[in-house]
């Protein structure tokens, strides 16, 4: 009986980084709207995230008028947290100088156009938009790598979203397991769903974390997540659900260090003696 042909594990390239099995976990500091509408603070957070050692920072590119009517009670707050067009180039330069990649969540054609003008390396699609097929198509047609979060979604909805993206000819996709609770209870994390996603879609997989603290995200790293997205804030006591589930600068540094140690500890499936074991084996035996 012939041995089955096994191809290489799926990989994705984003901004010179290779993402997939056997490569370092692609760590994303999710700044989102935690800048609180302050450009100077956003720039400072970029520098802090870079110092912590992440690979990328992510923002949220939304316009209040695309989400709610002007009479909606949340309209003014959403507009306060928007990223104006002039921010994009400034933040992109700050990220380039700090040595981290910058990308953002695609929500509408206008901000997608702003990001394309600056050559963003990839796009994120949020859990809320898994069934927003026109947005999935338009984003995929740009030909850039895409990262799809899957909170609130059934497997059939995720499958249709992946099919919608891939039908454009764009196969540059990573799928993130996510639980859309703010905050999420660790008992609801169900991290082994990453195995299911990897098996179903044959692409890099990861985890977008909404738990308080870093324990669940570290568990995802130990289980082999290719990408981990963790919210980041300058001060967790700031009002707002995203701040509550975020890490502060010193915590983010410790998190990155712990993930890199876990990567080294995972090793391989091959049983072999360490150098220390080889040196001490004769003495111990």
Image (cartoon, grey):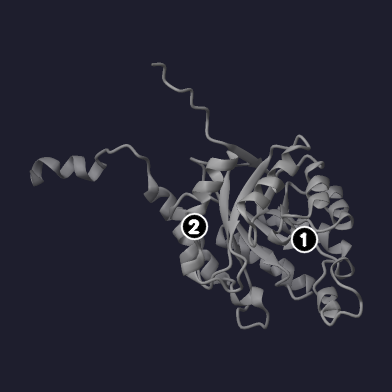
Instruction: Identify the secondary structure beneath mark 1.
Output: helix
Report, in whole angstroms, how far the alpha carbon at label 1 lies from the one at label 2.
33 Å
Q: Position of residue 31 (x, y in %)?
A: 68, 66
Determine which quarter of the picture holds residue 153: bottom right
Q: Residues within 10 Å of mark 2 (few under 14, many from 20)?
A: many
Q: Which residue is depicted at the point 53% across and 71% down?
A: 250
Q: Which residue is depicted at the point 56% across and 58% down?
A: 53
Q: Is residue 99 visible?
A: no
Locate residue 57 relative to residue 139 in the image: left or right.
left
Locate residue 105 relative to residue 277 in the image: left or right.
right
Q: Is residue 223 visible?
A: yes
Instruction: Identify the secondary structure beneath mark 2.
Output: loop
Furthest-right residue in this view: 70
Q: Residues within 10 Å of mark 1 (few under 14, many from 20)?
A: some
Between marks 1 and 2 in the image, the one whose residue lies nearer the viewer: 2
Q: Earlier in the sequence, mark 1 or mark 2?
A: 1
What residue would you read off at disc 1? 91
Residue in front for this viewpoint, 11 or 129: 129
Residue in front for this viewpoint, 47 or 212: 212
Q: Position of residue 39 (x, y in %)?
A: 79, 70
Q: Position of residue 58 (x, y in %)?
A: 69, 59
Residue 23, numbered label: none
Q: Position of residue 147 (x, y in %)?
A: 67, 50
Furthest-front residue in this view: 156
Quadrant containing the C terminus in the rendered view: top left
Q: Dots 1 and 2: beta carbons under 8 Å? A: no
Q: Which residue is depicted at the point 91% across and 80% down?
A: 71
> How many numbered markers are drawn?
2
Residue in front for this viewpoint, 170 or 263: 170
Quadrant containing the N terminus in the rendered view: top left
Q: Which residue is depicted at the point 44% across and 50% down?
A: 263
What residue would you read off at disc 2? 191
């Amino acid at each position: 009986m012939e041995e089955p042909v096994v191809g290489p594990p799926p990989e994705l390239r984003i901004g010179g980084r290779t993402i997939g099995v056997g490569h370092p976990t692609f760590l994303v500091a999710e700044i989102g709207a935690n800048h609180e509408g302050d450009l100077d603070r956003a720039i400072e957070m970029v520098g802090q995230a870079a110092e912590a050692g992440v690979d990328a920072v992510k923002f949220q590119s939304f316009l209040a008028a695309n989400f709610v009517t002007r009479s909606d009670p949340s309209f003014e707050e959403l507009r306060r947290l928007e990223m104006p067009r002039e921010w994009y180039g400034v933040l992109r330069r700050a990220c380039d100088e700090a040595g981290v990649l910058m990308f953002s969540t695609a929500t509408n054609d206008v901000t997608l156009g702003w990001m394309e003008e600056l050559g963003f390396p990839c796009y994120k699609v949020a859990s809320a938009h898994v069934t927003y097929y026109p947005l999935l198509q338009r984003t995929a047609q740009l030909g850039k790598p895409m990262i799809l979060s899957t909170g609130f979604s059934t497997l059939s909805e995720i499958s249709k979203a992946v099919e919608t993206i891939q039908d454009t000819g764009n196969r540059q996709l990573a799928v993130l397991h996510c639980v859309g609770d703010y905050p999420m209870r660790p008992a609801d994390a169900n991290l082994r769903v990453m195995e299911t996603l990897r098996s179903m879609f044959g692409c890099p997989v990861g985890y977008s974390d909404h738990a308080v603290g870093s324990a669940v995200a570290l568990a995802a790293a130990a289980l082999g997540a290719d990408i981990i997205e963790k919210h980041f804030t300058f001060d967790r006591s700031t009002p707002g659900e995203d701040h509550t589930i975020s890490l502060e600068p010193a915590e983010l540094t410790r998190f990155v260090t712990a993930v890199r140690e876990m990567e080294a500890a995972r090793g391989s499936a091959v049983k072999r003696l360490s150098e220390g074991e080889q040196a001490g084996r004769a003495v111990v035996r």
